[in-house]
């Protein structure tokens, strides 16, 4: 019988639905219908915002100030972070920052596309 990595003398009663780690009764938590280990439950509940969520906001602001490309990178980071939060792979505390990063990134993308269109069509007028 497999044992719990946190409590090696205890037999595992389930497998974490996120990371696949064996868990004993003391370490088992249910999130909806899925069993989670304590580490995955902590990630799912919150904690601190991830670096990726924070970076998406910073890049969005930098993009608006210094050209739009960094903001587009921030948009991509924000999108990845929001997906990771949905899959319980990133702390939910970063959801607000990731949404702000997504909005700033979308603005950067819109401005970048407008600048490119202006450069292309401005020559033909």
Image (spheres, helix red, strand yellow):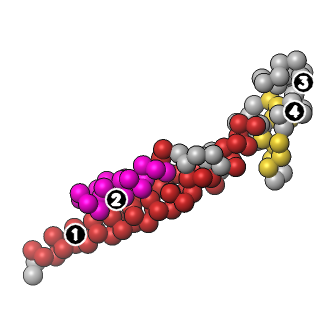
Q: Which residue is mark 2?
A: 61
Residue 15 visible in the snapshot = yes
Point out the frontmost of discs 4 and 1.
4
Q: CA distance from mark 1 to mark 2?
A: 18 Å
Q: Earlier in the sequence, mark 3 or mark 2?
A: 3
Crowding around mark 4 (Cα neighbors within 10 Å: few <14, some 14 to 19, many 20+) is some
Q: Compared to 53, does 27 lie above or below?
A: above
Q: Earlier in the sequence, mark 1 or mark 2?
A: 2
Q: Which residue is mark 4?
A: 26
Q: Which residue is mark 1?
A: 115
* Between 102 and 100, the one nearer to me in the picture: 100
Residue drawn at x 57%, y 57% is 95
Q: Earlier in the sequence, mark 4 or mark 1?
A: 4
- Span highlighted in magenta in the image: 53-73
Mark 2, secondary structure of its residue: helix
Examine the structure image and report whether residue 3 is included in the region drawn in magenta: no
Residue drawn at x 27%, y 65% is 112
Residue drawn at x 65%, y 49% is 46
Q: Which residue is mark 3?
A: 11
Q: Earlier in the sequence, mark 2 or mark 4?
A: 4
Crowding around mark 3 (Cα neighbors within 10 Å: few <14, some 14 to 19, many 20+) is some
Residue 67, picture quadrant: bottom left
């Amino acid at each position: 019988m497999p044992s719990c990595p946190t409590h090696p003398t205890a037999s595992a009663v389930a497998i974490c639905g996120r990371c696949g780690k064996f868990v004993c009764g003391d370490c088992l938590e249910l999130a909806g219908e899925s069993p989670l280990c304590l580490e995955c439950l902590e990630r799912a509940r919150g904690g601190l915002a991830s670096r990726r969520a924070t970076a998406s906001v910073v890049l969005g602001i930098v993009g608006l100030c210094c050209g739009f490309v960094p903001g587009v990178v921030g948009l991509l980071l924000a999108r990845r972070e929001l997906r990771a939060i949905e899959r319980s792979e990133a702390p939910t505390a970063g959801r607000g920052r990731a949404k702000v990063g997504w909005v700033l990134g979308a603005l950067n993308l819109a401005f970048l596309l407008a600048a490119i269109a202006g450069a292309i069509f401005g020559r033909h007028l």
